Image (cartoon, rainbow, N blue to C red):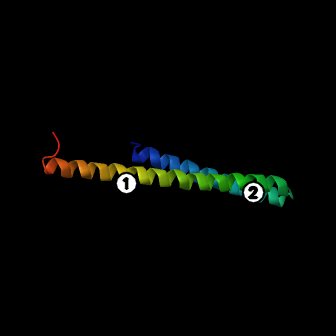
Amino acid sequence: MISEDLTNKRAQVTIDLMGSLAKAVDKFLEEGKAKEASDVADSLTMLIVKTFEVEAVNTMSESVDRASRQVSTRKHDLGELD
């Protein structure tokens, strides 16, 4: 299981990267480089999508683990486990 501290650091790095990409889009637009701005915006969009996908999977995994532990505890309480 990933420690909370590591999770917080990963989240901060992701937020910093998103901010840097957004600034790069603005800079390219100011310089009239629409193609470059579009490419960076696409990268930013993919980063956002992948971040949400990873978080959704982590949340589901944690929920499954928690439910599994609850089932094991209940079975133990009922004397169904060795």
How many numbered marks are there?
Answer: 2
Q: Which mark is residue 63?
A: 1
Which residue type carries mark 1?
Ser
Q: Is disc 1 surrounded by few (<14), some (14 to 19) or many (20+) residues within 10 Å?
A: few
Which residue type carries mark 2?
Val
Residue farthest toward the left in the current orientation of the protein: 79
> Do callouts 2 and 1 mark residues in contact (Cβ within 8 Å)?
no
Residue farthest toward the front in the current orientation of the protein: 80
Residue 67, position as x, y percentages in the image: 31, 53
Residue at left 81%, top 52%?
A: 36
Image position of 48 (left or right of 31): left
Quadrant of the drawing holding the C terminus: top left
Residue 4, position as x, y percentages in the image: 40, 48
Image position of 30 (left or right of 12): right
Please tell me which residue lies in front, 61 or 36. 61
Quadrant of the drawing holding the N terminus: top left
Residue 51, position as x, y percentages in the image: 56, 52
Q: CA distance from mark 2 to mark 1?
A: 37 Å
Residue 70, position as x, y percentages in the image: 25, 52
Image position of 33 (left or right of 82): right
Residue at left 58%, top 54%?
A: 15
Image position of 43 (left or right of 75): right
Q: Which residue is mark 2?
A: 25
Q: Is residue 42 above or below residue 82?
A: below
Q: Which numbered mark, 2 or 1, is in the foreground of this view?
A: 1
* Image quarter of residue 26: bottom right
Secondary structure of the residue carrying tag 1 is helix
Residue at left 49%, top 47%?
A: 9
Residue farthest toward the top in the current orientation of the protein: 82
